[in-house]
Amino acid sequence: MVAKVMDFRADRDDSGAGAGLPAHEQVYRRLRDMILFGELEPGQPVTIQGLTVTLAAGMTPVREALRRLTAEGALEFQGNRRICVPVLNAAAVEELTVARGALEPELARCATSRATPEDLDRLTEIDARLDHAIARGDLAGYLRENHSFHEELNLLAAAPILTSVVEGLWLRFGPSLRVVCGQVGTRNLPDQHKALLDAMARKDAEEAARAMAEDVAQGMAQIAEALQDSDGGAPRA
């Protein structure tokens, strides 16, 4: 999966589609981005016909993309040919919090031991773009740069199995993160990136892991609170 993610980063053009890739892979990556960055909202149904228009693609690559993303848990089959972005419930958020809290600090720990000054410069540049998006209130920019920061960090860890699992987790909570951003605004979102970068610069792997754990916990707590607010204050079953 690390190789796949690295290819994805290298082959992307500005629209997020993969340049020079087969049509089915371009459609998969574009639809994956739409889910990851909340262009498709939780509970929003999608149809093959609608996606062929939106993605300017044929039915066969769209079907294949839907099949792959459903298998990955990013989409949910509801019968009668209905497919939608899953709506997270309280139990799902709790599982995602536990999984992210176990894996992403470990990736941060591994990345810290491997990061070069050039790697840290690249992460710092991404974080600066993220800050700029926050200052502008650019929701789409924030979501993309935030994911880019975490993706870059995970690649540095050189732990392909963990990275693959974490990428799948992000697909599951990404649409809900977009909803949270819309409710609280970009300026009120948690960000432990500065503390993480400082720890990485000092080669303090344990402190980097703690900063990542806090970043994950705060972000997932906001998603949980947003779910409660949408249900009138009652946790969802």
Image (cartoon, rainbow, N blue to C red):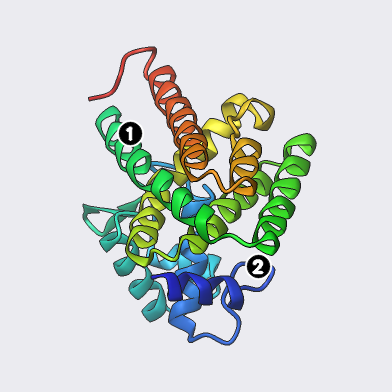
Q: Secondary structure at mark 1?
A: helix
The image shows residue 38 at horizontal and vertical percentages of: 52, 47
The amino acid on which the numbered mark 1 sits, given as a three-letter code, is Val
The residue lying at 38 percent from left, 19 percent from top is: 228
Earlier sequence position, callout 1 versus callout 2: 2
Could you say which is closer to the camera, residue 94 or residue 46? Answer: 94
Give the total number of marks visible in the rendering.
2
The image shows residue 224 at horizontal and vertical percentages of: 39, 26
Q: Secondary structure at mark 2?
A: loop
The residue indicated by pointer 1 is: 93
Circle 1: is it few (<14), some (14-19), or many (20+) Cα within 10 Å?
some
The amino acid on which the numbered mark 2 sits, given as a three-letter code, is Ser
The residue indicated by pointer 2 is: 15
Q: In which quadrant is the N terminus drawn?
A: bottom left
Circle 2: is it few (<14), some (14-19), or many (20+) Cα within 10 Å?
few
Tell me the distance, in whole angstroms, between the alpha carbons under discs 1 and 2.
Answer: 30 Å
Q: Is residue 227 above or below residue 151?
A: above
Could you say which is closer to the camera, residue 61 or residue 229? Answer: 229
Q: Are marks 1 and 2 in contact (CB under 8 Å)?
A: no
Could you say which is closer to the camera, residue 177 or residue 124? Answer: 124
Q: Is residue 57 visible?
A: no
**122 with respect to 56 (left or right):** right
The residue lying at 46 percent from left, 65 percent from top is: 51
